[in-house]
Structures are given as structure tokens and as C-alpha cells.
Image: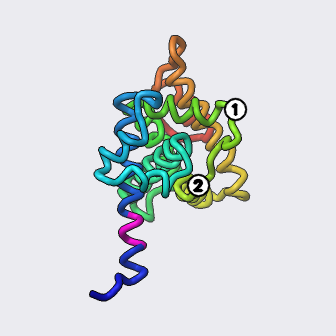
Amino acid sequence: MSPRRASVNEAMRARSRARIMQATVELVDERGFAGTTLGDIAERAGLARGLVSYYFPGKRYLLQSSTHRLMHLKLAAALAELEETDPPDLWLATSIDTVLTLTRERPTLMRTHLALILAPSAEGFIQDEEQRRFGALLQGVLRRRGAADPVAEHAVLRSALMGACMGMLLPGAETSPALIRADLFARYGLRP
């Protein structure tokens, strides 16, 4: 029996990581962060518990990375529906709507994600590969709109989107998604 090629091993690792991250967002959305263990995640993913710890240094990192992956995949799918010739404003409107829809559809997951980002810790805001992919998509949208500095404008857009999500999810003081969307659209000069 010959050993597997490096590319086969890498593909297997990528599939395992994806299964772990998918299981994480599902379980945290169902049970919350405290009600989800790494063992639960491994079981849902159909993998050995040790693989979860091998790929991810802790539950907090795993959740942030998994949420960034979900955001990246949702935004990539939404943008893939657009035509290259569609107006740049439509690309930004689609990006905003994708994040707001995800927040509305998965409030437990998004509330937990934001709480972990804001909670003091040595890890802080995790800028992993999944977060970079999501950021690259948003920077591409801003570049398409003619941004002079897409990296800096992305930081502002990311902050605006995080604030919008927090406004929608703040227990006891939730703001209407329609009002938040209207504010973001006005801020960027988009037509509703």
C-alpha cells in the first residue's frame, strides 16, 4: 500500500476542519456556547475528539473561526449570484443584506460570536484565515465601488456591520432590522 499524496492529506484535513466548523455553528446555535462541549462538536462532526483540539486551540477560537467561515460562505454565495456588470452599489447592498439576514436567522450564534469578540481575553478578535477570507470579499466589494483605501474602508464597514448586528441583538433593546438596514443604506448612499 503506497502512502497518500500530500494533496490528498490536505483535502482530508480541509474536510475535517469544515465538518468541525459546521458542527460548531449548528450546536452553538441550538444550545448556546456554554451548552456546547468540544466532545459534542466532535460527535456531531463524526470525528475523534482529539481532532477538534488538534485543529483549533480552544472552543472560543473554534467558534469565532466557525462563525467567520459561515459569514464568508454566505457572502460568497450571495455575491456569486450577481453579474460582473451589476452596479457596485448592488454588490455593497447585497453584502449588507447578507450579514443582516444571517444575524436575523441565527441570533444565538451571532450574539455569542459578538459577545466573545467583546469579552476581554488574551485572544481578543481572532483574525484567522476564515476572517481574512470574509474581509477580502468585503474589500473587493469596496474596491469595486472605487474605494481609495479598501483596507481602511473595510475596517469602517466591519465596525458598522458589527454595530448593526449588536443593535439587532441587544436583549431588551433590539432595533428593527428594517431601521438598521435603512441607516446603513443611507450611510453608504444606497437606494433601499
Decide if residue 23 is on the left or right side of residue 142. Answer: left
Task: Tell me where residue 3 appears, x and y as whole percent.
Answer: 35, 84
Along the viewing direction, whichever of 171 and 104 lies nearer the viewer: 171
Along the viewing direction, whichever of 164 and 112 lies nearer the viewer: 112
Secondary structure of the residue carrying numbered label 2: loop
Disc 1 marks a residue whose amino acid type is Pro
Residue 90 in sight = no
Residue position for label 1: 120
Q: Residue at x 44, y 63 (%)?
A: 85
Along the viewing direction, whichever of 49 and 96 lies nearer the viewer: 49
On screen, 157 above or below 109? below
Disc 2 marks a residue whose amino acid type is Asp
**Residues in magenta?**
10-14
Q: Residue at x 52, y 55 (%)?
A: 130
Task: Tell me where residue 90 appears, x and y as whole percent.
Answer: 47, 50
Q: Please give the label number shown on residue 128.
A: 2
Separation of disc 1 and disc 2 at Cα? Answer: 18 Å
Q: Is residue 12 magenta?
A: yes
Q: Please give the label number shown on residue 28.
A: none
Task: Tell me where residue 186 appears, x and y as whole percent.
Answer: 59, 34
Decide if residue 41 is on the left or right side of residue 146. Answer: left
Judge the density around disc 2: few (<14), some (14-19), many (≥20) Cα neighbours within 10 Å.
few
Along the viewing direction, whichever of 66 and 20 lies nearer the viewer: 20
